[in-house]
């Protein structure tokens, strides 16, 4: 560390006690500077803060110069534990697989039929109407093919002027009809496409939110991928229905009409014309197959880029402070390399395939034209009819080609939707709405862990809780302390049923939490995390988030209890101040206090505080903790009047007043009792941690 300049911001005094210079900042100005000893003498604020955290009365010892290192040594052992034998790991994995099958159930319906997601009867009628309009639009090409020969012959008629005028009028009329039918078909399909996209987006959005936390932790379900799945991928539904389907129906109509009319004019020529159709058909099929792979890769490349860009943008402070921009650009370039290589090969294949299909197309024409001469020679058709039949065929060929170009496009577009359909079909492992009829009334708050064994789905080989037992009586204030990685936050995550344990039971009011309706259960639990997430809305809306309909007085009351009302009132726009993305326009402590106010407004029966006051200065923390400690709900809705709280904290001054302090190590309870009991055990973990933290004052 020699020679390195370190600037450290901390509320915990033990962290900064050995700093060369400590700067006390008040209201945006440097109030005092000096060493720990100097400030103790000259700064009342500093010495008060130290007193608040100096919870050991006999703190006369010198602070060890390596106090942080000592703490780290103490807690270093507490990190993830591997299983002692491979067999154990295997058994655990098997158990986890049984309990967490993680199988994504995909229905047997072809994705094409699922495009029309959630459409109603009236939409089906609209589709039929739009398809009829498209079918009428399809008449124009065979009609032109039929009459172009008639007009050609009419030019040699003595009454040519009248006849040609008549046929011109027919073409004009057909033009007007197709104008109206085209407008109708695209308008109707456009609306149906928009509706289907909206339905799919809504369903997907709620399907995403239904998933359990473990699902969101998988790399394929990162923010970028999910955004792309919900916003970009679903827009292909509209593209397929609005832009492609109308044209497909129009092409099919053209082909059918042309088949019937050309057979009617001369069935031999009609048969030969369509006998060469496999040339077009095979060409189209080859194209369809190649286009599927071709477009699929570019979509994946695009998703990776979206993911990188959104991650970099949302963490721009970290990226900028580590000057990591170039690395991200390199990663982005790298993510595009592989698809680029593949695209080159695919492009080559695509070219060859296009060439073959065009060659087949020409051969088909050559055979049909040659056969016209054969028919005329054998007197099996007049020149006029054989050419007319061929004209109908040749003018409809573009529709056939268009059809076989559109179909692969639609197929590849449907392939893009597969992840969205998979997400839609996935059965969440923690169902939020079962049982459907939530219990009545309110919980009391008695919480019990019975021999709980737990590991995270993303790391099944690492045990987090290993036979964890704990009983919390209603109204108790319980604190969880222990080294980093001991599993404290995981205990809170299990109470909220973010995850299910693979062994043992978590009971609330003597009932397994798996048997509660999850939404009902979570409504009664309040969680404040170390890094609370605020939304880019006003402070008022952030506080009342999830408690809609609360009055201004209740919001202010909650803010007062969280010791943030004074700060908010001092802002030019007060409670209307918008806090920026993730609350970026507020300090860490202000965010924590707003999050505490938000949770208090929810009036939870069980309050979970996970390092919720770690960013607060000693004075603020004291105010917040004492108002939380005295928290009682007015009993207006049969709610338990006394709140049950579980606090996770590293700063032991935060937990000193708890009724029960639970010391955890390696996923187990190693000590339990109140502060006085625990401190009296000289060689106890709590006692050691406590002495280390207290030793910062001479
Ligand atoms: N979502 C997750 N997926 C996989 N492992 C996780 C996850 N969250 C936490 N862990 C691991 O679980 C272990 C326990 O984490 P937990 O957050 O419960 O500990 P803690 O005692 O609260 O630690 P700290 O005091 O540092 O917050 C750690 O080793 C951590 O790496």
Image (cartoon, grey):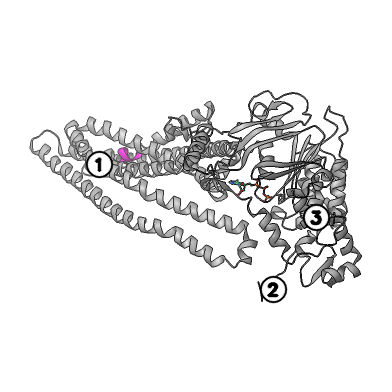
- Residue 405's place in the image compared with 519, above or below, is below
Looking at marks 3 and 2 on the same chain, the residue that comes earlier in the sequence is marked by 2
User: What crowding class fits label 2: few (fewer than 14 Cα within 10 Å), some (14-19), or many (20 or more)?
Assistant: few
Residue 485 is inside the magenta segment: no
Looking at marks 2 and 1 on the same chain, the residue that comes earlier in the sequence is marked by 2
Residue 460: x %, y % from top left: 53, 42
Residue highlighted by disc 3: 616
- Which residue sits at x=79%, y=51%? 652
Query: Residue 38 — which label?
Result: none
Q: Which residues are magenta?
A: 140-144
- Residue 636's place in the image compared with 25, above or below, is above
Is there CB contact under 8 Å for labels 3 and 2? no
Residue highlighted by disc 2: 5
Residue 143 is inside the magenta segment: yes
Mark 2 element type: loop
Query: Which is more toward the observer, 196 or 122?
Result: 196
- Tell us which disc is closer to us: 2 or 1: 2
């Amino acid at each position: 560390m020699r020679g390195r300049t370190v600037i450290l911001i901390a509320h915990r005094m033990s962290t900064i006690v050995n700093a060369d210079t400590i700067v006390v900042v008040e209201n945006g100005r440097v109030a005092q500077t000096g060493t720990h000893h100097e400030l103790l003498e000259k700064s009342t604020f500093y010495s008060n803060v130290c007193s608040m955290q100096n919870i050991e009365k006999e703190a006369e010892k010198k602070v060890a110069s390596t106090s942080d290192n000592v703490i780290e040594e103490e807690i270093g052992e507490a990190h993830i534990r591997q299983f002692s034998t491979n067999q154990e790991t295997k058994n655990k994995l098997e158990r986890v697989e049984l309990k967490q099958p993680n199988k994504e159930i995909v229905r047997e319906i072809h994705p094409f039929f699922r495009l029309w997601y959630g459409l109603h009867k009236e939409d089906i009628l609209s589709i039929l109407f739009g398809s009829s309009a498209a079918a009428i639009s399809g008449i124009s090409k065979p009609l032109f093919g039929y009459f172009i020969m008639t007009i050609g012959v009419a030019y040699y008629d003595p009454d040519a002027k009248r006849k040609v005028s008549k046929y011109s009028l027919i073409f004009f009329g057909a033009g007007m009809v197709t104008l109206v039918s085209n407008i109708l078909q695209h308008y109707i399909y456009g609306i149906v496409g928009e509706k289907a996209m909206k339905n799919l987006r809504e369903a997907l959005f709620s399907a995403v939110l239904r998933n359990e936390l473990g699902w969101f932790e998988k790399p394929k379900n990162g923010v970028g991928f999910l955004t792309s799945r919900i916003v970009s991928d679903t827009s292909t539904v509209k593209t397929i229905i609005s832009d492609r389907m109308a044209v497909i129906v129009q092409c099919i109509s053209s082909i059918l009409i042309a088949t019937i009319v050309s057979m009617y004019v001369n069935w031999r020529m009609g048969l030969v014309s369509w006998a060469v159709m496999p040339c077009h058909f095979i060409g189209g099929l080859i194209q369809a197959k190649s286009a599927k792979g071709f477009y699929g890769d570019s979509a994946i490349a695009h998703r990776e880029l979206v993911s990188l860009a959104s991650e970099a943008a949302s963490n721009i402070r970290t990226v900028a402070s580590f000057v990591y921009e170039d690395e991200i650009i390199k990663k982005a370039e790298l993510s595009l390399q592989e698809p680029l290589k593949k695209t080159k090969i695919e492009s080559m294949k695509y070219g060859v395939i296009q060439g073959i299909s065009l060659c087949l197309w020409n051969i088909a024409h050559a055979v049909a034209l040659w056969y016209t001469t054969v028919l005329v020679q054998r007197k099996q058709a007049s020149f006029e009819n054989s050419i007319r039949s061929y004209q109908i065929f040749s003018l409809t060929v573009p529709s056939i080609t268009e059809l076989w170009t559109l179909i692969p496009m639609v197929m590849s577009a449907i392939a893009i939707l597969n992840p969205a359909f998979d997400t839609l079909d996935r059965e969440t492992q923690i169902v939020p709405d079962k049982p459907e009829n939530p219990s009545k009334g309110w919980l009391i708050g008695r919480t019990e862990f019975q021999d709980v064994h737990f590991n995270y789905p993303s790391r099944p080989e690492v045990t987090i809780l290993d036979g964890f037992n704990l009983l919390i009586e209603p109204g108790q204030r319980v604190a969880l302390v222990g080294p980093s990685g001991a599993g404290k936050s995981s205990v809170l995550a299990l109470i909220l049923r973010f995850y299910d344990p693979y062994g043992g039971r978590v009971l609330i009011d003597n009932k397994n939490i798996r048997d509660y309706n999850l939404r009902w259960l979570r409504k009664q639990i309040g969680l404040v995390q170390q890094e609370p997430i605020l939304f880019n809305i006003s402070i008022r809306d952030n506080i009342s988030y999830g408690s809609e309909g609360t009055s201004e007085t209740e919001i202010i009351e909650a803010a007062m209890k969280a010791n943030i009302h004074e700060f908010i009132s001092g802002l030019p726009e007060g409670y209307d101040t918008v806090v920026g993305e993730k609350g970026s326009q507020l300090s860490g402590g202000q965010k924590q206090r707003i999050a505490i106010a938000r949770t208090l407004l929810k009036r939870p029966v069980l309050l979970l505080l996970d390092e919720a006051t770690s960013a607060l200065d000693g004075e603020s923390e004291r105010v917040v903790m004492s108002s939380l400690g005295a928290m009682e709900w007015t009993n207006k809705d049969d709610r338990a009047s006394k709140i049950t709280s579980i606090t996770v904290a590293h700063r032991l001054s935060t937990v000193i007043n708890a009724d029960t302090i639970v010391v955890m190590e390696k996923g187990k309870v190693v000590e339990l009792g109140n502060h006085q009991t625990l401190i009296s055990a000289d060689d106890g973990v709590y006692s050691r941690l406590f002495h280390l933290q207290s030793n910062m004052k001479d």
